[in-house]
Image (cartoon, rainbow, N blue to C red):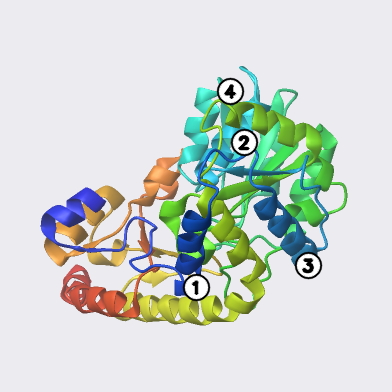
Amino acid sequence: MTALANQHKAINLSQGFPDFDGPDWLKDAARQAVIDGPNQYAPSHGLPVLRQAIADTTRRLYGLDYDVDTEITVYSGGTEAIFSTLTGLLDPGDEVILLEPFYDSYPACVAMAGAVARYVPLRWPNFEFDQIELAAAFNARTKVLVLNTPNNPSGKVFSRSEMEVIAELVRRHDVYVMTDEVYEHITFDGAQHVPFATLPGMRERTITVSSTAKTFSMTGWKIGYTLGPPALSKAARSAHQFVTFCTSTPLQVAMAEAIRRLEEYKPVLDAEYRERRDVLLNVLQEVGFEVRPPRGTYFVLADFRRFGFEDDVAFCKYLTTEVGVAAIPPSAFYFHKEEGRHLVRFAFCKNVATLRAAGERLQTLRARAAAAG
């Protein structure tokens, strides 16, 4: 979609990267780290200064204690952390439960590990799972359940009660959990992110993936990490050793500074993303989309059927080539394609001016909605 957007000079609200950089003080920290060094290989599992910053902040925010040497690992982005974790944990023939819509790397990682995915839908508009369907997905071959909260692309933030249902099934079937919590610091409307590892009995069977890219708007730096008990961390590290081995050394130094300053930076992050979200929501509702306001992430899913389309790929091509705004067809995030075929995903990790300009172009959809009745 980004290539199509470039071809047609469309405003790109498709791919989830900001059109702005993170704070200047973070750039200054990276610049100084390059000058001062080290600029050689970092330890494979991450610089001690970064792992310590992660441990300290996780303890302050969530009351979770992780050993910096055996339970925290740094990767080249959250996506590599996901790949290394699943590759390290899974053997051929194992089964993995994926809640859909999902981040699109999950099925690929499962397939490359020789494992089998079982899918449980989160259905529009509330993106709740059916407890009977979820329970039926478990069997003797189930090894891992993947939980993404806040969820990309739906913007759903799982409640504690929903996670308790998952935790009970995980205990009953003796399953590991990989939680993807990279959007943990981007939430709205009073939604509280609850790390799955804080639930009773879950810390020892959960490996949590997070990332600095979303929080600090430096997606090109690719600094992700996991937190998990020694056995699960060792499995992920065993794969990581042969995937990227280690991550950019000076950028790890800079991100250690960023994580130490997270609580100072968080009010700015909250205010700016709340404004961006609300600008886009207002436009989408105004022109005729049916929208479910996201409670987390920087994505919005919207139902476009009022405009006379039934297929998300066709609608996104029309948006890009005729309206001049690029978005993502969410059926790419579903195994059961019909669950997402009436939806479109917009990213609002953009300057407010970009979102307003997109809003002006989207106004042309009003006439189409009227014509479609």
Across and down, in percent, residue 293 comes to 49, 72
Of pointers 4 and 3, the one earlier in the residue sequence:
3
Q: Secondary structure at mark 4?
A: loop
The amino acid beneath tag 4 is Ala
Query: Quadrant of the image for the C terminus?
Result: bottom left
Q: CA distance from mark 2 to mark 1?
A: 27 Å
Of pointers 1 and 3, the one earlier in the residue sequence:
1
Q: CA distance from mark 1 to mark 3?
A: 23 Å
Left or right relative to 174: residue 111: left
Residue receiving disc 1: 25
Query: Could you tell me which residue is drawn at 52 percent across and 31 percent down?
Result: 109
Residue receiving disc 4: 115
Residue 44 numbered mark, or none: 2
Q: Is residue 361 above or below residue 223?
A: below
From the viewer's side, name the closer residue of 316 and 89: 89
Of pointers 4 and 2, the one earlier in the residue sequence:
2
Across and down, in percent, residue 169 comes to 78, 41
Query: Could you tell me which residue is drawn at 79 percent across and 62 percent down?
Result: 59
Residue 60 numbered mark, or none: 3
Indicate which label's residue lies in the foreground, 2 or 3.
2
The amino acid beneath tag 2 is Ser
Please tell me how crowded label 3 is: few (under 14), some (14-19), or many (20+) other residues with Cα within 10 Å: few
